[in-house]
Amino acid sequence: MPVFGRKGSSVHVQEMLRAMRRLGHEPALYCARVGGEPPADLADVPVVERRIHGAAGAERERDTADAAAELALAAIADGCDLVYERYALFSEAAAVVARTADVPSVLEVNAPLVEEQARHRVLDDRAGAERATRASLQAASTAVCVSGPVEDWAREQGAPRTIVLPNGVDVDRFAPAAHAPTDRPTIAFVGTLKPWHGVDRLLEAAAGLPLRLLVVGDGPEGAALRERAERLDLEVEFTGAVEPSAIPELLARADVAAAPYPGGEEDYFSPLKVFEYLAAGLPVVASATGQLPILLRDGVTGVLVPPGDVEALRAALAELIDDPAARRRMGAAARAEAVREHDWRRVAQAALDAATGASAHPLEVAS
């Protein structure tokens, strides 16, 4: 994962760095892949990079484990007060920290990666990956899990100390925008154009409705989705991949946002886009799957529909298109909830408190 990249995982790391700094801490970044140039506000974060070598398969997996251990030892040698790690395959960094230093560690768990890797990509040494996972989960001061299903999985791996802490949003960068009345509201989607995001269903649901679609992102389904939009005679703007810094301005053009997940066995996610939609003051039409029925209040901050149900999705969009007052009411409630519950600073503080107990003292954080 490139830390200074465009993926949701990259954005997550960047936002935690920002939040820790705003809380008065001094994070330093220890990573296997920096990626591109850092955003201007993170350009002065100290960075230690140890690239992973070897072709895909056993050789690369072994070097991944070596890199994680070396980075953990470097962080300890540099005198950090706490190690905050994003769980990665073959990393035993939390266990290394526990064995070599008297500092707390947080292991942030976003997904059951062993299962994901085996199902979607290549996993040569599954036993080794499972062993490293158990070692880190059992050694970390606390495992911060983005959803209840992820916490259940972490506990199954032997994690003795866990909390559920969903993702967050920068409520200063994402903010509501004033909109002129329009007879064709704009519906926004942000994300990678892959099957499990359900953009094909969004296009089908939009057919025949008086709306515009704004699709932000790119991916392997991009060409097929553009062709489908043309066949359906839809008014769609496909932006392609954009820098994370461009997302707030794009969402400011929208009236409604969509998260049309088809549902399935991977419903453990905590989607960053939905938190960004809320902070932007947008009512959210989303599938009632995974964490979304907990995150969104049906009829208050958005509208929930059955996963994969195109007709229900169309009806929800039509309802909001026809009711500007409802859009404004839901958007205001969405913004208020984002500010109250989902600010990244709140997320970061809760994670640090879980590992150390509430503390007023700034920390040297290795991330």
Image: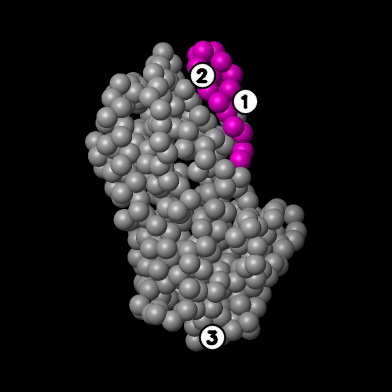
In the image, which disc is placed on residue 235?
Answer: 2
Q: How is the image coloured?
A: one colour
Identify the residue at horizontal 31%, vertical 56% (top origin): 340
* Alpha-carbon span between mark 3 and mark 1: 51 Å
Q: Which residue is mark 1?
A: 223
Task: Residue type at mark 1: give it.
Answer: Ala
Residue 255 visible: yes
Task: Tell me which label, 2 or 1, sits earlier in the chain.
Answer: 1
Q: Position of residue 54 (x, y in %)?
A: 75, 59
**Left-right relation of 134 to 65:** left
* Alpha-carbon span between mark 3 and mark 2: 58 Å
**Residue 108 position (above or below residue 191):** below
Identify the residue at horizontal 30%, vertical 34% (top origin): 328
Which residue occupies the foreground of this view, 113 or 78?
78
Task: Residue type at mark 2: give it.
Answer: Glu
Which residue occupies the foreground of this view, 28 or 151?
28
Count of labels in the image: 3
Q: Please report the bounds of the magenta region as a residue range.
A: 224-242
**Left-right relation of 55 to 218:** right
Q: Which residue is mark 3?
A: 101
| Residue occupying the far right of the picture | 54
Residue 283 magenta-highlighted: no
* Alpha-carbon span between mark 2 and mark 1: 16 Å
Task: Residue type at mark 3: give it.
Answer: Ala
Q: Position of residue 197 (x, y in %)?
A: 47, 36
**Residue 330 position (above or below residue 25):** above
**Residue 291 position (above or below residue 239):** below
| Foreground: disc 2 or disc 1 | 2
Q: Secondary structure at mark 1?
A: helix
User: Residue 13 appears in which quarter of the rendering?
Assistant: bottom right
